[in-house]
Amino acid sequence: MRLFITRPLPDAVIDAARARFDTVVRQETLPLTGQELRTALQEYDLVLPTLGDAFNAQVFADVPRPRAKLLANFGVGYNHIDVAAARSAGVAVSNTPGAVTEATADIAMMLILMTARRASEGERILRAGKWDGWHPTQLLGLHLGGKTLGIIGMGRIGKAIARRCKLGFGMDVIFYNRSPVADPGIPARQVSFEEALGADVVVISLAATPETKRLIDAGAFARMKPTAIFVNVARGDIVHEEALVEALARGKIAGAGLDVYEYEPKVTPALLTMNNVTLLPHLGTAALEVRTAMGLMAVDNLIACAEGRPLPNAV
């Protein structure tokens, strides 16, 4: 079976794919173009896409009888794939949950600490040669001990973030989740969406779906404390970025830490000028062993499809 891998992946993943399939690896690092999306469906039995490869409804409408039988997505988030349109065209979709959990939670902690303790701002001052030395009131930030963490989305990643904050920093944990969570893993309290937004640190770890698009809007920011830190390690379009800019500019919240962006890879220009914002270039799973595990999980799904078995990680 012919397999198309849309971006370069770790060597171990490519080797595993080539051991089983007639594999073509595209060497570009940017998302597939419109024509490439359609060609992938027409000329390959299997496709291993990733973030930004926009297999939307129009693509499937243009290729109503695709050769491809599976989009084995590299990543847990799959909002770039119209799953309903894929299914209607006879194309299954899988993802890579679990492999990303701990690494993404680590990045959330990095963003929480960097934003609360103003680390990015301090480094910029230092690198610019503007640091005149220590003094008692310089760059005073938020101490995390004893503060309340509000998690929006208590799945695998949310639980991993909660564990780090509770056990590592002694934070009280509250969370909002659409369905009841029987075992959050640590002492934590499930609350309403509005109450979770009232925490000292608010972290977004939801899946991106049509229902969660711009869930965090001007109304949500209005419910947050003016001393609150806001962190997003989920998907950018869960947050209305212009509303975030306004909330930061008007002092409705104290700071933000972002690893994802609404119009990624474009970042709203105002965010780039704000000292109270920590910005990372989507580093959530950027560790070799993590990206390798993700790729091998995707290959497991590809092999299952080829052998006619149930997909281990069907969406």
Image (spheres, rainbow, N blue to C red):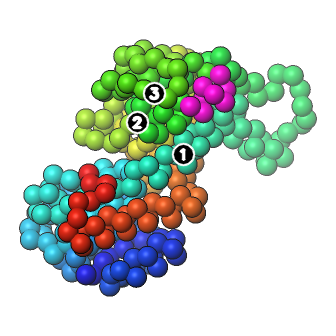
Image quadrant in which the N terminus is located:
bottom left
* Disc sitting over residue 102 in the figure: 1
Q: In this picture, is 202 found above or below 19? A: above
Q: What residue is shown with label 2?
A: 155
Q: Quadrant of residue 178?
A: top left
The amino acid on which the numbered mark 1 sits, given as a three-letter code, is Glu
Q: What residue is shown with label 3?
A: 184
Q: Which residue shows up at 46% across the image and 17% down it? A: 189
Dot 3 falls on a residue whose secondary structure is loop
* Disc sitting over residue 79 in the figure: none
Q: Is residue 231 visible?
A: no
Residue 268 placement (x, y as % from top left): 47, 44
Give the mark nearest the N terminus, 2 or 3: 2
Residue 104 placement (x, y as % from top left): 52, 46
Q: Residues within 10 Å of mark 2 (few under 14, many from 20)?
A: some
Q: Which residue shows up at 38% across the image and 24% down it? A: 182
Q: Which residue shows up at 23% across the image and 60% down it? A: 310
Q: Residues within 10 Å of mark 1 (few under 14, many from 20)?
A: some
Q: Residues within 10 Å of mark 3 (few under 14, many from 20)?
A: many
Q: Nearer the viewer, residue 19 or 219?
A: 19
Residue 311 as seen in the image, left or right of residue 249? left
Q: Which residue shows up at 17% across the image and 59% down it? A: 86
Give the mark nearest the N terminus, 2 or 1: 1
Dot 1 falls on a residue whose secondary structure is helix
The amino acid on which the numbered mark 3 sits, given as a three-letter code, is Pro
Of tags 3 and 1, which is closer to the observer? 3
Q: Which residues are magenta?
A: 163-170
Q: CA distance from mark 2 to mark 1?
A: 12 Å
Q: CA distance from mark 2 to mark 3?
A: 9 Å
